Image (cartoon, rainbow, N blue to C red):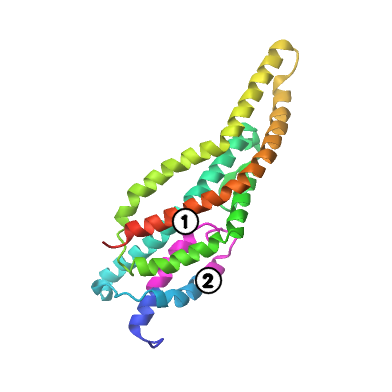
């Protein structure tokens, strides 16, 4: 097929739209620390590289103005759905770190988090970066690229049924909150017991300034718990990566045309 062939150029353009949607939403690729020009260049290179996987027929209405816009929107939605599906567990881990930080009174030290693009406490950032680093060491970014290539074989260009992705993604968002609470549960329990101990101490020694003592005490206890927690959580991360793979494959199966 000639590089100047109209159908080939149109096919590459649609592949580029799906790749760009994934780049905007998928973990690691969507980080604002990566310059936009780099992401656009990577999307163009991937579009030309993956165009060979998109061998299915194009929709008949793609040659019309309105039809072309609809196909572009479908392709952008396909990439975004894949990216957001892969990020759900990342949000859960970041939210768990935020809960832990609030319990340690680290909400007083909010800083900018380039992963989420919002402000979060330092503990949430450390946990998010640790999870992202483990994801990269486990070749998670390569899995996303493989899933992207596979998506063109499962979901033809312009053929995704995006309406089917809504119910499972809502269910996964519910699991997101449960996972965040499960990860933060040791912190919540131990720091709750610490609050009880401080309350008993305040009743026994009324002259003590409880507010002055509670902040450093909870901070020291929280750091100690976090050091133990992170050692036990890192071996648990591969199972979360397996869930990410299952969710991405499941959403591809759901949006594939019947």
Query: Is residue 38 rendered to the left or right of residue 224?
Result: left
Q: Where residue 210 appears, x then y in whole percent?
A: 71, 20
User: Which disc number belongs to residue 42?
Assistant: 2
Give the residue drawn at x 46%, y 62%: 22
Q: Where residue 9 appears, x then y in whole percent?
A: 38, 80
Rendered image quadrant of residue 31: bottom right
Q: Which residue is mark 1?
A: 245
Q: Please tell me which residue lies in front, 240 or 48.
A: 240
Q: Please tell me which residue lies in front, 217 or 156.
A: 156
Rendered image quadrant of residue 137: bottom right
Characterize the magenta stretch by its predominant secondary structure: helix
Give the residue drawn at x 68%, y 20%: 198
Q: Where residue 207 appears, x then y in whole percent?
A: 75, 13
As helix, strand or loop, the secondary structure at mark 1 comes to: helix
What stretch of residues is rendered in magenta?
14-40
Return the disc, 1 or 2, that comes first in the chain's sequence.
Answer: 2
Mark 2 crowdedness (10 Å alpha carbons): few <14, some 14-19, many ≥20: some
Q: Please tell me which residue lies in front, 81 or 37.
A: 81
Q: Is residue 176 magenta?
A: no
Contact flag, marks 1 and 2 (Cβ < 8 Å) = no
- Height in image: 109 above or below 244? above
Q: In the rendered image, is residue 183 in sight?
A: yes
Q: Quadrant of the C terminus?
A: bottom left
């Amino acid at each position: 097929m000639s590089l100047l062939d109209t159908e080939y150029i149109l096919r590459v353009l649609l592949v580029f739209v799906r790749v760009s949607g994934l780049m905007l939403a998928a973990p690691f690729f969507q980080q604002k620390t990566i310059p936009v020009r780099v992401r656009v260049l990577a999307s163009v290179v991937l579009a030309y590289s993956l165009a060979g996987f998109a061998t299915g027929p194009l929709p008949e209405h793609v040659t019309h103005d309105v039809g072309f816009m609809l196909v572009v929107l479908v392709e952008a939605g396909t990439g975004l759905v894949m990216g957001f599906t892969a990020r759900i567990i990342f949000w859960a881990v970041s939210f768990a770190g935020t809960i832990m930080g609030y319990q340690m009174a680290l909400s007083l030290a909010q800083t900018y988090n380039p992963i989420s693009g919002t402000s979060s406490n330092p503990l949430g950032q450390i946990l998010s970066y640790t999870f992202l680093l483990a994801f990269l060491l486990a070749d998670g970014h390569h899995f996303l690229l493989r899933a992207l290539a596979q998506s063109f074989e499962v979901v033809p260009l312009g053929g995704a049924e995006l309406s089917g992705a809504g119910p499972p993604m809502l269910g996964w968002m519910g699991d997101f909150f449960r996972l965040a609470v499960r990860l933060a549960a040791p912190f919540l329990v131990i720091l709750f017991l610490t609050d009880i101990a401080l309350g008993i101490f305040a009743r026994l020694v009324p002259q003590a300034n409880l507010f002055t003592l509670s902040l450093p005490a909870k901070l020291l206890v929280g750091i100690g718990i976090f050091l133990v927690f992170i050692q036990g959580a890192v071996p648990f991360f591969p199972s979360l990566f397996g869930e990410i793979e299952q969710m991405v494959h499941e959403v591809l199966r759901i949006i594939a045309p019947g």
